[in-house]
Image: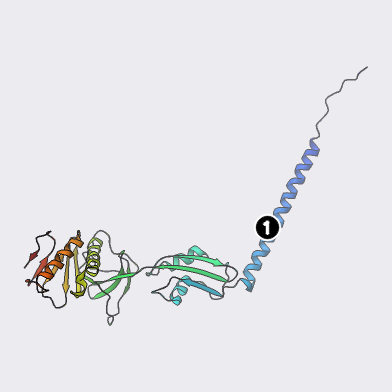
Amino acid sequence: MIARRGNIPRRRPARRARRFTRVFEILICISVVGAFGYFFAKYAIDSRDFRVRRVAIDGLHYLDEGTVLAASGIAPDGNVFAFDEATVKSRIEKLPYVESCDVGRVYPDTVAITIRERVPAASLHVGRRAYEIDRSGVVLREYAPTEMPMDPFITQAPGVNFIQPGQPIDKKTARPALDAALAVWDQVRASGLSDRLRVSELAALRGNDVRMFCAGEDYEIRWGGEDVEGMARRLEVLWEKFDGHLPCFEYVDLRFGANVACK
């Protein structure tokens, strides 16, 4: 006679025990890793092996290392782990000459800073003051009263009454005129005119009205904002034709194509 098998209960307690053991093992691992991380972090912060012994600054042409280091806020002999890279980057990029910078750590004891500087392009006269600017219109610094500003010397930029180093020139008002003045300057330097005309001032009145004043000449030369290369060629032809002695006393206007106006 075959006996019937009844319902055999599952061994749930054994499965629960294995699950509990696995969770316990995971918790132990997390605790060990956490403890290791804590003690390693404490060691790294307290150990002199990770003290900042060198700040390597690369890319400087106009700024000095002391200025960058002071702006960075990195403490002398501080810990290489104890500063925030984004904060140091933000501080350095507040320097007017700094376009951007990268900050990194080189373990065990070095902070690496790479600078991309703004390049001075012109001098801008505002009121009784003169400022150094780059091609994007950012004001780099104010000249001392005894300094000789760099060429070109740009004046009469519209809407510019007060400027602060580190701030850009207003794009809507002054920038078109400044860009036109820089384009004129570039073209004069690139052409044969640079050896014949000593440019003393570029009055950037508007984007289509730049007036160039030259030492030794009584008249002004008027440029537009477009086809500056063509204007320079016309001026060169005119200069050759009259051997540098143009029959003008007030102005030469190059903005009307082949019809150069002379008064």
Q: Quadrant of the N terminus?
A: top right
What amino acid is at disc 1? Gly
In the rendered image, the residue lying farthest to the bottom is 146
Asked whether residue 223 appears in the rendered view, the answer is no
The location of residue 35, given as percent across then percent down, is 70, 60
Q: What residue is at 55 percent from the left and 66 percent from the top?
A: 105
The location of residue 124, given as percent across then percent down, is 25, 71
Secondary structure of residue under mark 1: helix
Q: What residue is at 68 percent from the left and 64 percent from the top?
A: 39
The location of residue 169, given as percent across then percent down, is 29, 64
Q: Quadrant of residue 208?
A: bottom left
Q: Is residue 18 left or right of residue 113?
A: right
The colour scheme applied to this rendered structure is: rainbow
Q: Is residue 30 left or right of residue 152?
A: right
Residue toward you, 248 or 103: 248
The location of residue 219, given as percent across then percent down, is 11, 72
Asked whether residue 251 appears in the rendered view, the answer is yes
For disc 1, the marked residue is 34
Q: What residue is at 80 percent from the left and 32 percent from the top?
A: 10
Residue toward you, 187 or 179: 187
Residue toward you, 197 or 240: 240
CA neighbours of label 1 inside 10 A, class few (<14), some (14 to 19), many (20+): few
Q: Quadrant of the C terminus?
A: bottom left
Residue toward you, 163 or 232: 232
Q: What residue is at 42 percent from the left and 76 percent from the top?
A: 64
